[in-house]
Image (spheres, grey):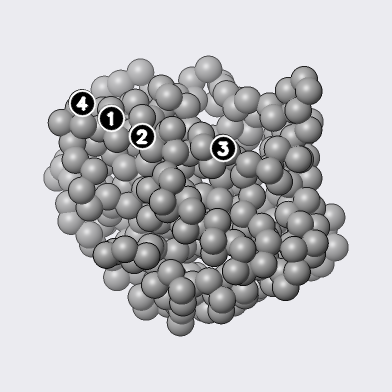
């Protein structure tokens, strides 16, 4: 494995497929997993925020983070991500800071601009303003955490001498990541010295290209890669046989394609994988999802470490069996 261990974390969705179980059980199962993560060697749980869809029924990662904090003492609690354009920035600063204080300083703050058109429409945020609102909100949150009283005048928000309380427990603020997929988003984050979260939808080679592009732009801006965690989100399907794992992966890929690119979401600024001549489900199976037996997937992870420098794997398990096999069979061998 080399001189440094690989960090393993879980990107926790709250999917409610076909609404075939009681909704409360979705949350109960997720919290049970978080307790298992605490007792195992996971670095963090990153909580996924979505709205107006059974794809993931967690509209507040900050409230869910409080529950995770109450059930754990060691596990870091990541927002994967806070959808910044849909918040008033001062309230966002308050909520994340409060979570940091009450968790004992365990917050990893991930922020993103969102992509689901249904969210922009129902929150009344013009999609064409998503990037400017996102970037302005991030600036305000960071300044609210680090300045005694905040004065700000921008395209969307204006404040004069407002005190934001509480301040985060971690000083000067919790570690920060920006969800970045496009070259422009990666370049913006690197130019300001932000670390990035890499998405679960790009192919493995594309992830490698994005990491290299980020490192180049980071260095150009005068920042170092040293000491940074760059979580790479990967969908994962595990089973005791290859065919069983492939079936879990196929169902997961179909769920992703239908949820992300169906009529409900109609994504903003995200390329539709159903381009002419491409089977989007097969693309996920061939290029995106890590699937197979634990031994086979462990080999895939180690190959990605060698080929693209993967050192922080953010797993999105596509079944409970996958999560348990990940915990029992793969996690101990990556530590």
* Residue at numbered disc 4: 220
CA separation in Å, label 1 and label 3: 19 Å
- Where residue 210 appears, as percent x and y from the top left, is 42, 33
**Most foreground residue, 318 or 56:** 318
* Residue at numbered disc 1: 216
**Most foreground residue, 306 or 263:** 306
* Residue at numbered disc 2: 212
The answer to which image quadrant residue 77 occupies is bottom left
Residue 146 visible to the viewer = yes
- Where residue 127 appears, as percent x and y from the top left, is 56, 22
| Above or below, 330 relative to 264 | below
Q: Residue furthest bottom?
A: 39
- Numbered label attached to residue 202: 3
Marks 2 and 3, the one that precedes in the sequence: 3
CA separation in Å, label 4 and label 3: 25 Å
Left or right: where 294 falls relative to 37: right
Q: Residue at x 68, y 27 (%)?
A: 272
Question: Mark 4–mark 2 contact, CB under 8 Å?
Answer: no
| On-image quarter of the N terminus | bottom left
Marks 4 and 2, the one that precedes in the sequence: 2
Q: Residue at x 47, y 27 (%)?
A: 182
Q: Nearer the viewer, mark 4 or mark 2?
A: 2
Left or right: where 30 falls relative to 259: left
| On-image quarter of the C terminus | bottom left
Residue 85 visible to the viewer = no
- Where residue 132 appears, as percent x and y from the top left, is 41, 22
Question: Mark 1–mark 4 contact, CB under 8 Å?
Answer: yes
Q: How many residues crowd mark 4 within 10 Å: few (<14), some (14–19), many (20+)? A: few
Question: Mark 2–mark 3 contact, CB under 8 Å?
Answer: no
């Amino acid at each position: 494995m080399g001189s440094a261990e690989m960090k393993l974390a879980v990107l926790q969705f709250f999917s409610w497929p076909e609404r075939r179980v009681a909704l409360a059980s979705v949350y109960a199962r997720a919290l049970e997993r978080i307790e298992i993560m605490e007792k195992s060697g996971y670095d963090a749980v990153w909580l996924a925020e979505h709205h107006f869809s059974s794809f993931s029924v967690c509209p507040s990662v900050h409230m869910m983070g409080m529950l995770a904090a109450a059930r754990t003492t060691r596990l870091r609690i990541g927002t994967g991500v806070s959808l910044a354009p849909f918040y008033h920035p001062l309230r966002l600063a308050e909520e994340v800071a409060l979570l940091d204080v009450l968790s004992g300083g365990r917050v990893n703050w991930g922020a993103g601009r969102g992509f689901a058109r249904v969210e922009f429409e129902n929150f009344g945020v013009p999609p064409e303003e998503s990037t400017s609102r996102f970037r302005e909100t991030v600036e305000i949150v960071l300044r609210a955490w680090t300045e005694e009283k905040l004065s700000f005048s921008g395209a969307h928000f204006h404040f004069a001498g407002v005190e934001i309380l509480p301040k985060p427990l971690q000083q000067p603020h919790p570690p920060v990541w920006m969800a970045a997929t496009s070259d422009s988003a990666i370049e913006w984050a690197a130019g300001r010295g932000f670390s990035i979260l890499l998405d679960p939808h790009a192919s493995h080679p594309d992830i490698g290209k994005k990491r290299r592009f980020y490192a180049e732009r980071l260095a150009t801006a005068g920042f170092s890669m040293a000491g940074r965690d760059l979580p790479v989100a990967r969908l994962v399907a595990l089973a005791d046989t290859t065919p069983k794992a492939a079936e879990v992966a196929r169902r997961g890929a179909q769920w992703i394609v239908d949820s992300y690119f169906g009529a409900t979401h109609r994504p903003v600024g995200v390329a539709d994988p159903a381009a002419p001549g491409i089977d989007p489900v097969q693309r996920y199976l061939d290029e995106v999802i890590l699937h197979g037996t634990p031994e086979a997937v462990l080999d895939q992870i180690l190959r990605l470490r060698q080929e693209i420098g993967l050192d922080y794997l953010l797993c999105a398990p596509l079944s409970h069996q996958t999560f348990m096999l990940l915990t029992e069979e793969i996690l101990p061998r990556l530590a």
